Amino acid sequence: MIHAGNQKITNKEQSPRVSELRGELRRKIATHTPNAGAHATAIPGLTLYHRTAPSPCYPAMFEPSLNVFVQGRKRITFAGMTYLCDESTFLLSSIDVPVVSQIVAASEDVPLLSLQLKLDMAVVREILSQEEFRTPDGSSPARGIAIGKTTVDLLQPFCRLLNLLDASEDIPFLSNLIQREIVYRLLRGPQGERLRAIATLGDQSHRTAKAIAWLRANYTKPLRVEKLAEIARMGMSTLHHHFRSLTAMSPLQYQKQLRLVAARERMLVEGIDAASAAFEVGYESASQFNREYKRFFGQPPMRDIKVRRLASSAMVSD
């Protein structure tokens, strides 16, 4: 199934002001990303992206974050659902989730331009404690990832946030205020319930998120579901149900994807062999690692790494 920001679109979202703000944000991102790649900024949690060519499908991990796209097109696949991200959309991830990412429209003349803002769940909880957020609507998020249409209310604070890159002395004070406004706008919007459920203490989704966070930090260790259920303060069957609801997989499948993605990254970045990567991420059998790697990525480890390096070299030379 394909999702493309299919929430109801209001006249406010279609107004010329939206196009104007998207153009402003596009210019700001282009100014602060003079070359292709990911660009960390002086603003904590904010990364700008500038891509000049389509890419093959690439497994990756999304942290709790908000991704705003202002040019180009990207396809994100998670749990059998495909999310098409273009200049009119944002992508919200409320938990750590494994996805398959692919840039489908980008060039030197019209690069993909986007930004990512990591979400501080402590800030989300603090804002939720305010009076206007104390009555939940009773809904529960089906997945830990969602897509929506960017609006004037969301684009305006992002433009102000990027303005701070030209006024570094203002970042320590003003960036926190603007990021709080962005979280507020998210919580007030159609996707706010996803954040609320993850952030609210005692909620089943919040407890499941604690288990996910623990597994994310300890994926190399042997998995005992009893231990995971204890961390989440849930029964094992309840944990399985809510874990699968948020991530579309079991804890064991989730751990396996974490290990495979981490092993691939180590082989690419550190240049180690497949057997070493397998043992470093927690596998006890190199042959099992090879089988699961081929099943997940489509080809054996070293062949996949060779193809990835050739693809990266071609993108650089272009």
Image: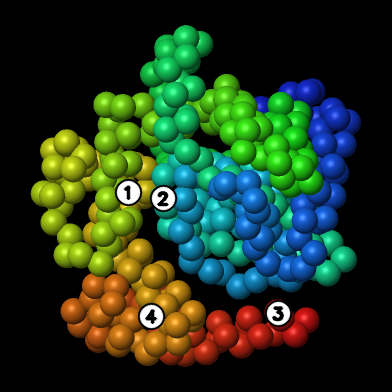
* Left or right: where 225 falls relative to 94: left
Q: Which residue is mark 2?
A: 96
Q: Position of residue 289 (x, y in %)?
A: 28, 80
Residues packed near mark 4 inside 10 Å, few (<14), some (14 to 19) or many (20 plus): some
Marks 2,3: beta carbons within 8 A: no
Q: Is residue 127 above or below residue 304?
A: above
Q: Which residue is mark 4?
A: 294
Considering every residue shown, the one lying at the far left of the view is: 226
Residues packed near mark 1 inside 10 Å, few (<14), some (14 to 19) or many (20 plus): some
Q: Nearer the viewer, residue 121 or 7?
A: 121
Helix, strand or loop at label 4? It is helix
Nearest-to-viewer mark from 4 and 3: 3
Q: Nearer the viewer, residue 263 or 171?
A: 171
Marks 1,2: beta carbons within 8 A: yes
Tally of numbered tags: 4
* Left or right: where 140 falls relative to 282: right
Q: How far apart are labels 2 and 3 at the CA level?
A: 28 Å
Q: Which residue is mark 1?
A: 213
Q: Position of residue 63 (x, y in %)?
A: 46, 50
Marks 1,3: beta carbons within 8 A: no
Q: Which residue is mark 3?
A: 315
Q: Type of residue at label 4?
A: Lys
Nearest-to-viewer mark from 4 and 2: 2
